[in-house]
Structures are given as C-alpha cells and as structure tokens.
Amino acid sequence: MELYSTKRSVPNVNFEEAVFKGLPSDNGLYMPTEIPQLPQEFFDKIDTLSFQEVAFTVANALVGDEIPADDLKVLIDDAVNFDAPVVEIKNQYNVLELFHGPSLAFKDFGARFMSRIMSYFLKKEKKEINILVATSGDTGSAVGQGFHNVEGINVTILYPSGKVSVNQEKQLTTLGGNITALEIDGVFDDCQALVKQAFLDEELNAKMNLSSANSINIARLVPQSFYYFWAYAQLKKAGKPVVFCVPSGNFGNLCGGLIAYKMGLPVEKFIAATNVNNIVPEYIKTGDFSPRPSIATISNAMDVGNPSNFPRMIALFGEEYESVIEEVQGCFYDDQQTEVAVKEVYEETGYIMCPHTGVAYLGLKQYFEATGSEANGVFLSTAHSAKFLDVVEPIIGKELEIPVELQSIINKEKVSIKMDKDFEGFKQYLLEK
C-alpha cells in the first residue's frame, strides 16, 4: 500500500510508515495512491460471508502487500470481534448499529484495528511509541479501550473540559495504566491543534516516538470502510439500492464509506449530516470551505469547526467539486430539531437514538421526502444512547437501562490532568513525561 500526502510536497510512504508517522511533515493527510476495485465475485457472495470474512477481504485488498494474509486474518478476527447489525425501524429506514464494541461507539472499529496493527509492527521492529489523540467524546474512550495495556504503546488523550458527557469522560479518565487523560481548557479544535502542532515540532519528534490515533491516521480510516460493506451484505437480499446517511464531525466516518464506494460498493447516495457546525454541508451547497470556531451542541462528538478529513474527502474525487456533489449530499440540524427527531422515532417505533443518530435520521428523512427514492435507507448510529443519559432521558421521558460496559465505570474516580491550550505548556509536559 503506497500512500501520498494530500499536500503532495513530501515523498510517498508505505502503510507501516504512514501508521507511525500519523501526519506527513507537510501537514497534509496520508491517502492511498490507488484504491483497489474488489471483484464482482466478492459482491455476488457477500451475503453468505461473516463480518470478519468481509472485513478481511477489504483489508487484504488495501494492505495485504505489507501484512501476510494469515497474520492479517488473526488481527482482523481479534479486532472485529463484535457485530454491527442493521436494524429496520420502519419501512425504508434502517439503522446501522455501530455501538456494540467495548466503548459503545463506532470508533471501537478504528481503535481496535489500529492498536493491533501498531502492535504487530512494533513487535517486529522491537520499538515503543507514544500516541497522542484529541477527542470530542467517543474517540478518546475508544482509543483508551483499544490501546489499554497494549505492550509498547503509551497513550495521551486530550479532551475539552466540560464539553464531553459525564459517561464519555468517565470512559477515558478511569483506565489508568498506559492511558493518560489531559483535560484541556478549550474546545475540541484546540485539542486537535495541540496534537497537530506536536507532530510538526522538531524537538518533540527528535526526543519522542510520536504517532496519532485520531481519524487523521490512515489505520483508523481503513476499518471504517468495513461496516459499509457489512450493511450492504445484510440488505442485499432486498434487491434495492442503498443510501447511507452519516452523522459527521471530523468526516473520517464518511471517508470510510467513500473508500468503500471507490472499491466498488454500490451506493445510490451518501448524505453528510451535521449539527449547526455545518462547514461541509455549506461547502457542498456553495463550493466554499470556510472553517470557523465550533459551537457546542447536544451532539457534542460532531462539534467540529475545521473537519480534519475534509482534504481526504475531496481527494477521493480528484478535488473536483462537481464530482463530490454528485455522490455526496449535505444537510444540518439544530438541537431543537434533533430533540424532536429522537422523541418522534421513540414514540413511533420504540427505538431509542443518541443525538448523533438523531441527526443522521433527519438527514435520511429529508432525502426521502425530497427525492421520493425507494432505496433502502441506512442511517448510522455511532454511539449507544446511554452514553448521553442527560440528553436522551428528558427527551423521551424514560429512564434508560445502563449497559454493563458503563455500569462498571460510573462509580470509578475520574483521573485527569488539567491544562490550558498553550502549546508550550503541553510540549513541556510531554518532554518531562
């Protein structure tokens, strides 16, 4: 797998180098020079395969030249050891549940795959590494769970103080061991900026072996394509086209779907649904990409004012605006609309959605009402509703059942290091650590 930087001013690298560098030195993002097309035979029999078999086929096509098939299969079976079921909630409306992993969020797929990939390469090279990751909520808990006690890897998680849910915070601040949580006095974009600046700092990189577990890392992106194929496999027998509506913040999840599309997955349309941090929907509407400070919402994991994966999204279409808008539609919703959607779906079907899932439902609903399409609609549920008790319970007027994974941490003591958003202070902490 050969990868280039989206800024195209540094040499190409292989998959292993891209995984450990995280970010190219020109501040671009790594992307495959070529995305392989999967054979028609795979799509003909996809509904007879297991999730692990589907994931292995996709991963092998992308990175199989660097990891022997037998090793990759063991890695996939360990990383993807939970399901991503498609649940029909009403005619044409299907929800792809991505919250059945250990942290109850879709980012378990990327974090677990990445930790196993890194561990595989580190054992081969007999090295250690320091992971830096910024989170707006679910990334931190998924990375923490995925990398907890993985040999040779230390993880530092940066999260915005007071801007993640209580349960999200508990998930990323109670692990201990090789996982450290930094509580930053700022917003997610400040956390992300600190991580990016660290990767570009020559002194830090000379003294520490740094890498990232954010969606800027290509190893996080690859497994996010797996569940799009798996959703298609579960719906194939219906014989209808498929539309995916993706709740979007940093846009790694959508890019995973677009990679699947480029590998041959038949998709009628992708819908990028955001909250009022609608930078990409505005780009799709106007052609103008204008980042701005993020606004806090009840769908906090999508509170991103400068989506990191935007360069990847347009790179997948040759940076041609007309090609982007042909396949991707944008929409956005405020908190009031999101609350109405969560309540509406619960009262109509009994299905309980987290606020991010509510945004995705609205995007699919708007698409069907505008187009009259008879496709099978799939909206992605990126987190379990119980991770947002303070938001969801008042909306539906019901106390939620707490999954075992959350019950085990609720009474644990939060352990975090408070820090401001000044880079020099962050840098000094890392050097002293």
Image (cartoon, rainbow, N blue to C red):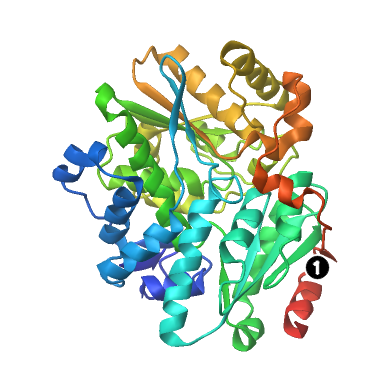
Whole-percent x, y for residue 167 in the image: 75, 46
Amino acid type assigned to the residue bearing label 1 in the image: Asp
Whole-percent x, y for residue 90 in the image: 47, 15
Q: Quadrant of the N terminus?
A: bottom left
Whole-percent x, y for residue 204 in the image: 65, 82
Q: Quadrant of the C terminus?
A: bottom right
Residue 22 can be seen in this image: yes
In percent of the image, x 60 and y 82: which residue is there?
205
Q: Could you say which quadrant of the image residue 342 lies in?
A: top right
Q: Is residue 298 left or right of residue 217?
A: right
Q: Is residue 432 depicted above or below 18 in this figure?
A: below
View extreme (left): residue: 41
Whole-percent x, y for residue 271 in the image: 46, 31
Q: Is residue 90 depicted above or below 96 in this figure?
A: above
Q: Could you say which quadrant of the image residue 212 lies in?
A: bottom right
Between 14 and 193, the one lying in front of the other is 14
Q: Is residue 58 left or right of residue 76?
A: left
Residue at label 1? 422
Residue 164 can be seen in this image: no
Q: Is residue 207 depicted above or below 231 in this figure?
A: below
In percent of the image, x 57 and y 48: which residue is there?
250
Q: Could you say which quadrant of the image residue 132 lies in?
A: bottom right
Q: Secondary structure at mark 1?
A: loop
Q: Is residue 222 left or right of residue 395?
A: left
Total labels drawn = 1
Crowd tier of the residue under label 1, counting other residues whose Cα lies within 10 Å: few below 14, some 14–19, many 20 or above: few
In percent of the image, x 70 and y 46: which residue is there?
406
Q: Is residue 366 left or right of residue 258?
A: right
